[in-house]
Image: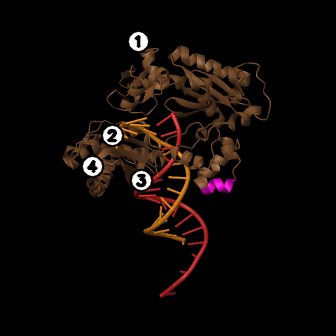
Chain colours: A brown, B orange, C red
Amino acid sequence: MFVDERDAPRVGKGLATILHADLDSFYASVEQRDDPSLRGRPLAVGARPTGGVVLAASYEAKAMGVRTPMNGRDAWKLCPHMVSVRPRFEAYTEASRAVFEIFDDTTPIVEGISIDEAFLDVGGLRRLSGPPIDIASRLRDRVRTDVGLPITVGVARTKFLAKVASGVGKPDGLLVVEPDRELEFLHPLPIEKLWGVGAVTSEKLRARGIHTVADVASLDGEVLVGLVGRAMGRQLAALSHNVDARRVRTGVRRGSIGSQQALGRARRDRRELDEVLLRLVDRVTRRMRNADRAGRTVTLRFRFDDFGRATRSSSLPGPTAATTPLLEVARALLDAAWPLVEERGGLTLLGFTVGNLDDTGTVQLALPFTRSAETGLDTAVDAVRDKFGGASLTRASTLGSDPEAGVPLLPD
DNA sequence: TCTGGGGTCCTAGGACCC
DNA sequence: TCTGGGGTCCTAGGACCC
C-alpha cells in the first residue's frame, strides 16, 4: 500500500508527485530541541496542571492520551508526570521560516497550509532531483539536520491522499501511496479522515451507519447532498471516489487577518473592553501594514459567559490598513452589540478581524511624518498618483498617535 | 468542568439594481 | 396595482482545520 523502498512498483495512471510535509508535534518539538532536559519526556506546551489548554503535546505525552486542545486538568489526569512549558511563539515562527526555506529550496511549487505544514509539487523535478521518494527523503534529512526537527512526509498523486499519508506516517516517517493502490489505501479509512468531516458531520453520518470512506463511496450522491448540504456532499462524494483535482497553488494570500483575546470570567465594563479592543486593533493593523495588505470588512467576535458565540460585522467602502477608521468601525460595532453583551452576562472573549483583504497595490511610503508633515504626505501621494495613474490609490494617513482626536493610539 | 489563537469555506436571508 | 428572473453585495452564523 505504501512503501518506504526505492524499488517500489510504480504502476497506474499519473504519478505520485505531491508531497505533504508536516512537522511533528511542532511546538513541543521546538521546545525539546532547545532544551535537552525536555527530550524523551511527556511535555505540554501552553497548559499547566491547574488550567490552560494544551497547544501541543510531545509524542511521549500523546502516548498517554494527551491531545490538543485538551485542558490542563484533564491532561494531567492522564499524564501526571508531564512537564509544562510556556509557549514561545517567536521561536516557532523562526523555526517555521527555516523549514519553509528548505521547502522553497526543494521546489518552486510550495503551498503553505499553516505554520507547520505545506504541500510541495515535485512533478517537474525528476530529471533534476530524482524521483519524489528521494526528494522527500532528502527533505526530511535536511529539516532534521539543519533545523533539528522531525518531519513526516506523505507522497501521493493527489493532495488529499498525500495529506492522509503523512497523517498515517506520523511520527517522523515517510509514506508513499502508489497510484495503483489508492483505493485500497483510501476505502478502509474512517470518515473522519475526509477533509471537512468534523464532529458534527461525523455524528450525522455515523448515525446513518456510515463509518468508512468506502461507505461514503457507496452512497448515492443526492442522498449525500441531502444529508450534509450541497458543497459538503459533493466534496465528500468526490474524495470518497478518489477524485481530487486540486493543484498545489503558490502565492495564495490569506483573506483575513485577526486577533482575539480570552478575557477570563471577570466581568469587564465598557471602558476596559475598549482598551482590549484598542490593543487588538493596533496589533492587527500593524500586521496588515507589515504584510502590505488592506481590508474593508471588520468583524467582531464575541464569546459570552454561557459559552454562546456571536459575530458582528460591517464593511467600509474601500480597503484600508489605517488604525483610526478600523477602530471607529470596531467601536461602533461594540456599541451596537453592547445590549446583547449585557444580556448574556458579559464577554469571555473578544476578537477583531479584518477581512475582504485586498492587495493594496500600494507602495507603502514609510514616511516618518508628524501632523505638520501631513501636507508632505499629500504631496507624496499625488506624486505616486501622477506616476502610476493610481485609480484606486488609498491614502492611509493616521498611522501614529493622534492625541488631539482623543484616540490613544499605540506608537507605530 | 468548562478552553487558545490563528484561519477557511459555506449557507441563508435581505437589500438593491437591472 | 401587481408581478418575474438574475445577479451582486452585505451580514450573521456555523462547521471545520491546525
Q: Badge 2 is on which residue?
A: A261
The kind of secondary structure element at disc 4 is: loop
Q: Mark 4 belongs to which subunit? A: A
The secondary structure making up most of the magenta span is helix
Q: Residue at x 59, y 36 (%)?
A: A250
Q: Is residue A13 left or right of residue A174?
A: right
User: Which region of the structure is painted magenta?
Assistant: A220-226
Q: Nearer the viewer, residue A351 or A229?
A: A229
Labels 1 and 2 within one chain? yes
What's the CA distance linking mark 4 and mark 2? Answer: 14 Å
Q: Residue A346 has which mark?
A: 4
Check whether the beta carbons of the residues at disc 1 and disc 2 lie within 8 A of each other. Answer: no
Q: Mark 2 belongs to which subunit? A: A
Q: Is residue A195 left or right of residue A55?
A: right
What's the CA distance linking mark 3 and mark 1? Answer: 53 Å
Q: Quadrant of residue A263?
A: top left
How many residues crowd around disc 1 within 10 Å: few (fewer than 14), some, or many (20 or more)?
Answer: few
- The x, y position of residue A398, in whole percent, is 30, 44
Q: Earlier in the sequence, mark 4 or mark 3?
A: 3
